[in-house]
Image (spheres, grey):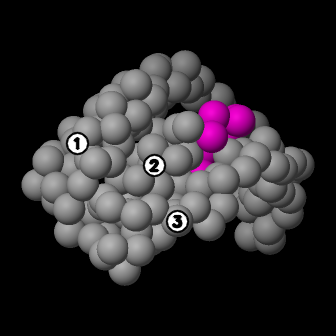
């Protein structure tokens, strides 16, 4: 399984409909769920100046955030996505919490692995299209 940051990144980029379906499927097994956070808001978008190596804030981004606790399992889940889709953030948190509690780990692991493979392929395709536009310039 991926480390937690990679897991959350993969879930945030996963197909929305499939993400929500997986969360719905595992939901009945989670027991009592305490919602700690379920909100939308603005967060600062950090960037790094590649020349100087210094960090700066590009601006604000609208996000939806969910944080839950599974009281019956002592596990927590978190989700944050760009935009205002609170249902998507909650689906992320449900899957994260289920994995933390050891519920449906094989099934959810396969879902995460498949989503990661799809994302890697999409990233590779995008990089190939970008590389195809590169122009070699001669300097004098």
- Asked if residue 82 is among those painted magenta in the image, a careful observer would answer yes
Mark 3 or 2: in front is: 3
| Residue 96 in sight | yes
Of labels 1 and 3, the one closer to you: 3
Q: Real-space Cα distance between discs 2 and 1? A: 12 Å
User: Which of the numbered marks, if any, corresponds to residue 111?
Assistant: 1
Is disc 3 placed on a helix, strand or loop?
A: strand
Q: Say whether residue 134 is left or right of residue 132.
A: right
Report how many numbered discs are placed on residues in the image.
3
Q: Which residue is mark 2?
A: 92
Q: Residue furthest bottom?
A: 74
**Relative height, residue 13 to residue 28 (above, below):** above
Q: Is residue 10 visible?
A: no
Q: Residue at x 62, y 66 (%)?
A: 36
Q: Is residue 16 left or right of residue 110?
A: right
- For this view, does 101 lie left or right of residue 110? right
Residue underneath mark 3 = 34
């Amino acid at each position: 399984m991926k480390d937690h940051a990679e897991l959350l990144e993969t879930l945030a980029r996963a197909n929305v409909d499939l993400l929500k379906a997986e969360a719905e499927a595992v939901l009945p097994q989670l027991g009592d769920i305490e919602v700690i956070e379920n909100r939308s808001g603005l967060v600062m978008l950090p960037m790094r100046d590649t020349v100087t190596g210094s960090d700066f804030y590009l601006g604000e981004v609208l996000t939806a955030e969910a944080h839950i606790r599974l009281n019956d399992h002592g596990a927590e889940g978190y989700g944050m996505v760009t935009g205002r889709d609170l249902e998507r953030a909650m689906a992320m948190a449900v899957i994260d919490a289920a994995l933390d509690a050891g519920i449906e780990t094989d099934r959810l692991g396969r879902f995460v692995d498949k989503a990661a493979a799809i994302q890697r392929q999409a990233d590779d395709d995008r990089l190939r299209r970008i590389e195809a536009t590169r122009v070699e310039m001669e300097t004098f």
